[in-house]
Amino acid sequence: MLLVNEPELTREKIREIIARRAAKEISEGDVVTLGIGIPTDVTNYVPTTMHVMFQSENGFLGVSKNAEEGSKDSRIINAGGIPVEARAGACFYDSQMAFVMMRGGHLDTTILGALQVDEEGSLANWSIPNKLTPGMGGAMDLVVGSKKVIVVMEHTSKGQSKIVKKCNLPLTAYREVNLIITERCVFNVLNGGLLLAEINPMFTIEDIKASTGADFTVSPTLKNMEI
Amino acid sequence: MKQILSKKEAIDLVKEGSSIMVGGFLNCGVPDKLIDELSDRKISNLTMICNDTSYPNTDKGKLIVNRQVKKLVTTHIGTNPETGRQMNSGELDIELVPMGTFVERIRAKGAGLGGILTQTGIGTIIEENKEIMTVDDKKFIFEKPIGADIALIYGTKVDKFGNVAYYGTTRNCNTVMATAADTVVVQADEMVDCIDPNDVIIPGVFVDYIVLNEDK
């Protein structure tokens, strides 16, 4: 696909734009789960004065920053296996309690990555059959159980849109995504399909159309993404 | 009073073809000494039920690399490329289960329930060949219990009554696995006479044997 204009964006800048925008979805008092990769970067842009509890599926509410060299304790890790610190008010519990929290509707927001998202709000992120199948881990439970599901990902991969009409990879969940944030734009997922709500001013609506594999409508109140 | 075994005596309980549950999330809260012994003894054709297969050279991952596992029931294999390789080549039979469903299926076995109903997996390949039930207009997948011959679990502190206490994120699926196997062996970082009842996470009733971490 050819873009009308192709702005130069480094991978680091792309990650920053996405994580910075996703951080604005987090409110005071929220209980939030972040996936691995770009979602983890979101913590960098949440004001330190804001009271937010980050939840980790290995049984940890109140995850703080990565532990410093010298104070790392292999008995306190996040779901990525990294030794981390606990913030004030944190607690530890077992996997059973973790999934009661995740599946029972007790989490406000989940932010995770995806291989594909489609215009119905279904997502795929755990398997490319016969190539790479890391497994779903807690992703299926998390997406079904969270009040709000936000997918953050690069708009395209190897020139192909990651936003598609219908996912052709094995689904993580059917119609559970509420918001899609890429470096180019923000889509709301509504019952009738995708609504372009915000656009990165480095791109035009034509650029978004040319680089998106799904249909969408443009919000009458389309805003610029704050980047 | 629970019996303290050497790790050799404990692993004598695992037979060729046994089904084993192994606690731990990646390499946190894993009964690593027990796994090392199992790995040295080359007991094979195992059915292993565990959260993940860790990394190739650590704990659960070694049993995969050694090809001691015939069937694996797990939630995530992305941290151990050898598991994926054996799956793609057909050498290893893997059932991938969403983590919440994995935990609840084990809990169902431990609690004497006939299974669980969950919305996780509806509309995905996870629902294939399973019974779908409708409760209050919502669709649920019926998932069966998972049990095992033996559970190898980790405990930070264990007392002589078999009560177990934990530090940090080491609890993970150790607690639920303690309820769902015919025989339960806990590897103890520290052995004490009596844990304060307020601090007990796994009641001793679920534990059969204790192996001390310093056991050679």
Image: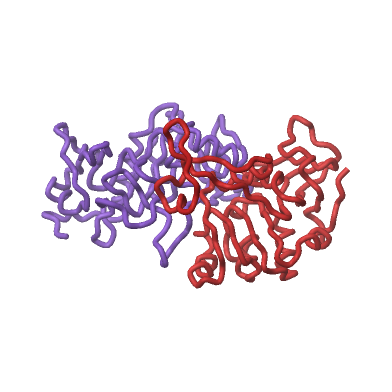
Chain colours: A purple, B red
**Residue A67 visible in the displayed image:** no
B89 sits to left or right of A7: right
A207 sits to left or right of A135: left
Number of numbered discs visible in the structure rendering: 0
Q: Nearer the viewer, residue B149 or B40?
A: B149
Q: Residue at x 40, y 63 (%)?
A: A129
- Position of the C terminus of chain A by quadrant: top left
- Position of the N terminus of chain A by quadrant: bottom left
- Rendered position, A161 above or below A120: below
**Residue A113 visible in the displayed image:** yes
Q: Residue at x 56, y 44 (%)?
A: A58
Residue A45 in the image: state x and y as whole percent. 37, 39
Q: Nearer the viewer, residue A5 or A157?
A: A157
Q: Nearer the viewer, residue A73 or B61?
A: B61
Residue A81 in the image: state x and y as whole percent. 55, 51
Residue A2 in the image: state x and y as whole percent. 14, 59
Residue B90 in the image: state x and y as whole percent. 52, 71
The residue furthest top is A29
Q: Residue at x 36, y 41 (%)?
A: A176
A194 sits to left or right of B46: left
Q: Residue at x 60, y 40 (%)?
A: A96
